[in-house]
Image (tube, rainbow, N blue to C red):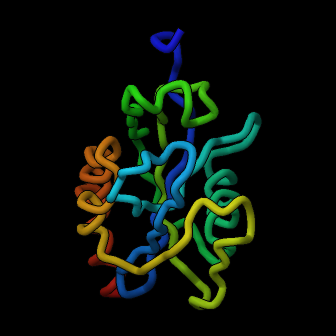
Amino acid sequence: MRENLGLRKAVGIILARDDGKIWTGKRKIGIGVRPNEKNLWQMPQGGIDIDESPENAAYRELEEETGTNSAEIIFTLDEWLEYNLPPELIGKALGGKFKGQKQKWFLMIFKGEDSDFNLNNHIAEFDDWAWRDIEEMPDLVVDFKKELYLKLVEKFSPIKDKIKNN
């Protein structure tokens, strides 16, 4: 049965300040997080609902996971990026229905204040957050997402410099 599982269509959000730093959240321990996992930091992400556009899903996920929607999409990655769950999480994480995710990534510029963030706004997925350089993220994310985050660094690092120069 597990070998027949597909990839869940999802979105990922790089929420950037005007200085190029990005918002990162520290995952709470629970379903989909291994108890001994040390690298718990990631960017907001989540599934696309039926009949929902990726753009609308990105804004919804941003608000659900960070408590704010004070942002504007300024860039969309053309390609979809994928990751697969490790064997011990297949059948448990992602509702047990998928072997991984196929994600459309968006770069959003943050228009609010740090006080806008509320990690208890929805079903809390994060228990802490920080502004970071995107280049730090591959070393802070769970190992099965590391390759995807390396691609994000490659694609978005040049854009970060443009944000800082405007």
Q: Quadrant of residue 24?
A: bottom left
The residue depicted at 34 percent of the width and 50 percent of the height is 142
- The quadrant of the picture occupied by the C terminus is bottom left
Is 84 on the left-hand or right-hand side of 56?
A: left
**Left or right: residue 83 compared with residue 5:** left
Tell me residue 8's x, y (percent).
Answer: 56, 32
Quadrant where the N terminus is found in the figure: top right
Q: Nearer the viewer, residue 36 or 100?
A: 36
* Residue 101 horizontal/vertical position (percent): 48, 35
Which picture quadrant has residue 52?
Answer: top right
The percent position of residue 138, horizontal first and vertical second, equals: 26, 57
166 vs 139: above or below: below
The image quadrant that residue 51 belongs to is: top right
The residue that appears at 49% across and 70% down in the rendered structure is: 15
The residue lying at 68 percent from left, 66 percent from top is 63
Q: Residue at x 43, y 79 (%)?
A: 130
